[in-house]
Amino acid sequence: MRRMSKQEKSWVFYDWANSAYSLLITTAVFPLYFKAAASEAGLAGSASTAYWGYANSFATLLISICAPVLGSIADFKGFKKRFFTFFFALGIIFTFMLAIVPSNQWLFLLICYILTVIGFGGTNIFYDAFLVDVTSEDRMNKISSIGFSMGYIGSTIPFILGITLIIFAQQNIFPLSVTVASQIAFAITALWWGLFTIPMLKNVNQVYYKARVSNPVSNSFKQLFRTIKKIKLYRPLFLFLLAYFFYIDGVHTIITMSTAYGSDLGIDSTNLLIILFVTQLVAAPFAYLYGRLADKYKGKNMLLVGIFIYIIICTYAYFLKTTLDFWILAMLVASSQGGIQALSRSYFAKLVPKENANEFFGFYSIFYKFAAILGPFLVGLTAQMTGNTNSGVFSLIVLFIIGAIILIKVPETNHLSPSNSYTSLDQ
């Protein structure tokens, strides 16, 4: 960290800041809190699960559709920071609201949650795109990987605080109800997210941009349509995004379905939380290691290494039987999940024309979001047909193999701009 510039450190600390939201709000605490709140209000378990799914789908779909348009507008001078700040404010305000809204107001809670998801997802579009502004191309692998490492470490601190409060409330060690303890955990998450975003807001600014025009919104739509129309000119980017869609789908499916998979093996919730916590800790140094190795052996090669490890993970999952097997599987996942995500971000950042970075990261966001569709469906269908969850996880091997084959075909190239491989979109 001492060898990083002020801008690089500030950018990295946003990963440290927002990862608390990912762990506590979307994964560990709020889903259970919402289910309990809905149940107390008389909502059936199946109905609350359905509403939870609808809420996540709606928020994801909305931000995915808007991402390229917002990104195209943000390419104009001064807009990137404004959009980042707007979505950040939206996310943090409604994360605080989760701590304030009475637990019996399940519908209001769900609306607040949807707005946090939109805020979180919208902010990440511009945060990822800021990578081109804070560092040089030869340092992108390293900085992106350090960001993921910091995120894994940073998320565990508020997670420990929140879970400790909830467990102590359950054991009557603190004179708090579980509801109040959960609400405090949400407030801690919002404070953590807000406090460590200050350096980003203060020190990171848009360096690469297009000159402002009189009608930036209509101009952005025209630019977006030109990009889509000339997508064939962007062959390396298109091939990478296609490969990314498949392999990141497998990565996300394993992450999001891991607790359900562990439950099917008979692992209780306490052990699952412990495994989740340890996975975060182990993932941090491995994410950094991937970045260092990518500088030596190239990012594309390390991405293929990560995909190969996930193929091993899918194969090992087929033979999974015991809690020890699940621990081994979790540690294998931890060895590569951060690295493959970090290098995907930096590899893509090297490919995009910097003055159009926001627009292209909008497309990146679409592929990232919609990659959460095929994998879970594949696992569910295979598990239902075979009656075996292990077979469902094993089926994900297809996604990694397809992703690897396409990634191999991505041409080795540096940053692409109209001056070399691409024709200017403005022509």
Image (tube, rainbow, N blue to C red):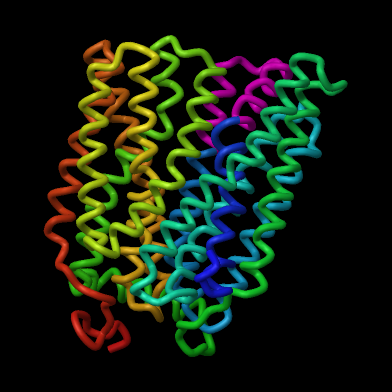
Outermost residue on the right side: it is 175
Q: In the image, is 207 to the left or to the right of 368?
A: right
Q: Is residue 50 magenta?
A: yes
Quadrant in which residue 138 is drawn: bottom left
Please, is residue 9 above or below residue 17 in the view?
Answer: below
Name which residue lies at 13% across and 49% down.
Answer: 405
Give the percent coordinates (x, y) of residue 30. Answer: 64, 32
224 shown above or below 121: below
Position of 109 with respect to 156 (left or right) is: right
Q: Is residue 367 magenta?
A: no
Count of number-bearing discs:
0
Which is more toward the observer, 215 or 422? 422
Segment tinted magenta in the rendering: 29-55
Q: Position of residue 178 (x, y in %)?
A: 76, 22
Residue 295 or residue 109, whichever sits in front: 295
Q: Main secondary structure of the magenta part?
A: helix
Q: Nearer the viewer, residue 248 or 373?
A: 248
Identify which residue is drawn at 70% across, 33% down: 162
For the residue pair 184 and 199, the one nearer the viewer reads as 199
Point out residue 309 in the picture as x, y percentages from the top left corner: 24, 39
Task: Please determine whether, in this image, residue 101 is positioned above or below residue 49.
Answer: below
- Pinpoint residue 204: horizontal percent, then vertical percent: 58, 74
Q: Quadrant of the C terminus?
A: bottom left
206 shown above or below 398: below
- Asked which quadrant contains residue 223, the reply is bottom left
Residue at coordinates 81% horizontally, 18% vertically from top-left?
173
